[in-house]
Image (cartoon, rainbow, N blue to C red):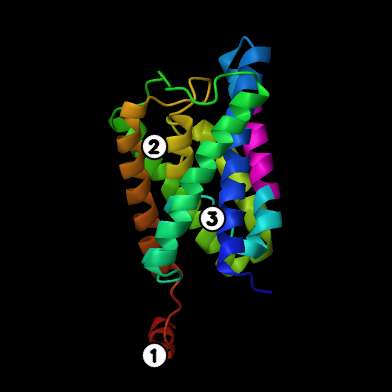
Amino acid sequence: MEFDRIRQHAAEAVGTAGLVATVVGSGIMAETLADDTAVALLGNTIATGAILVVLITVLGPVSGAHFNPAVTLAFAVRREIRPAKAATFASVQIIGGVMGTVIAHLMFEQPPLQLSETVRTGPAQWFAEVVATFGLVATILAGLRFRPAAVPWLVGLYISAAYWFTASTSFANPAVTIARSLSDTFSGIRPADVPGFLSAQAVGAVLAALAVGWLLREATARARVRSD
C-alpha cells in the first residue's frame, strides 16, 4: 500500500504534533501533580515512550513515521529519500511540532506560545544530544533491517531509556527541540540554546547513518571465504 505525497506529509505533521503535544502536555501535568522532579520526569517519560509506540504503529504505513528531521536526514544520507522530499518532510515536522506545543498549552489554559527560560547548554549537554540521536537513529535503522514490526516498540523503549541515561533527557529531534523552545514549562529549552542542540542532533544522525551502514553491510562471497 502506497500513499500520495500530500497524505505522507500530513501524516508527518500530525504525528509530530501528537508527539510534541504529549511531551509538553505530560510535562505540564507531571509538574502540576508532582513536587518531586524525578517523579515528574518519570511521568513525562512514560507518556512519551507510549505515544511513540502508538504514532509509529498507526502512521508508519503512511509516511514511514519519521516525525523527526534528524531521522529524515539519516535516510537522506543513506539515499533512501530524495533531498527535496527530505526538506519538505523536515518543514512539515517543524510546523507540526509547533502546532503540538500550541495544542498542549491550550489544553492547560496557558498562552499558546511562550519563550522558554530553561537553560540547557554546554559541552556535556551537546555531547548527550549526539549520543541520544546516534542511538535513536541506529535503533531505527537496525530495527528496520532485522525486526521491522518491532520498530514502534524499539523506538518507544529507547527514548524511555534515553530520557534517563542522557544528561539532556534525550531531545534527539530538531522539530521537538524547536517546539519545546516555545514552551516555558517543564519540558522547555531556552531559544538561545536551540542551535547547539540542533547541531549535535545533526552530527549524531549522520554518524549513525554512516556507522550502521558500515556495521550492517554484508560481506561479499570472497570476503566470507577469507574470514572462514
Front position in the image: 74 or 210: 74
Provide residue 98's location: percent of width, then percent of height.
51, 37
Front position in the image: 146 or 196: 196
Q: What element carries label 2?
A: helix
Q: Earlier in the sequence, mark 2 or mark 1?
A: 2
Q: Is residue 48 rendered magenta in the image?
A: yes
Q: Which of marks 3 and 1 is in front?
A: 3
Badge 1 amino acid:
Arg
Badge 2 amino acid:
Ala
Q: Give the residue at x 52% y 20%.
A: 185
- Disc sitting over residue 222 in the figure: 1
Instruction: Estimate the spatial distance between the alpha carbons at disc 3 and disc 2, rounded to whole Å.
Output: 21 Å
Q: Nearer the viewer, mark 3 or mark 2?
A: 3
Q: Give the residue at x 66% y 64%.
A: 61
Q: What element carries label 1?
A: helix
Q: Is residue 130 left or right of residue 98?
A: left
Residue where numbered disc 3 is placed: 66
Front position in the image: 162 or 183: 183
Q: Is residue 223 shown above or below 101?
A: below
Provide residue 45's location: percent of width, then percent of height.
61, 32
Q: Residues within 10 Å of mark 2 (few under 14, many from 20)?
A: many
Q: Is residue 135 shown above or below 25?
A: below
Would residue 20 be visible to someone looking at this image? yes
Residue where numbered disc 2 is placed: 128
Q: Earlier in the sequence, mark 3 or mark 1?
A: 3
Q: In this view, does 134 lie to the left or right of 185?
A: left
Would residue 39 be visible to someone looking at this image? no
Question: The magenta stretch spans which residues?
Answer: 42-54
- Disc sitting over residue 116 in the figure: none
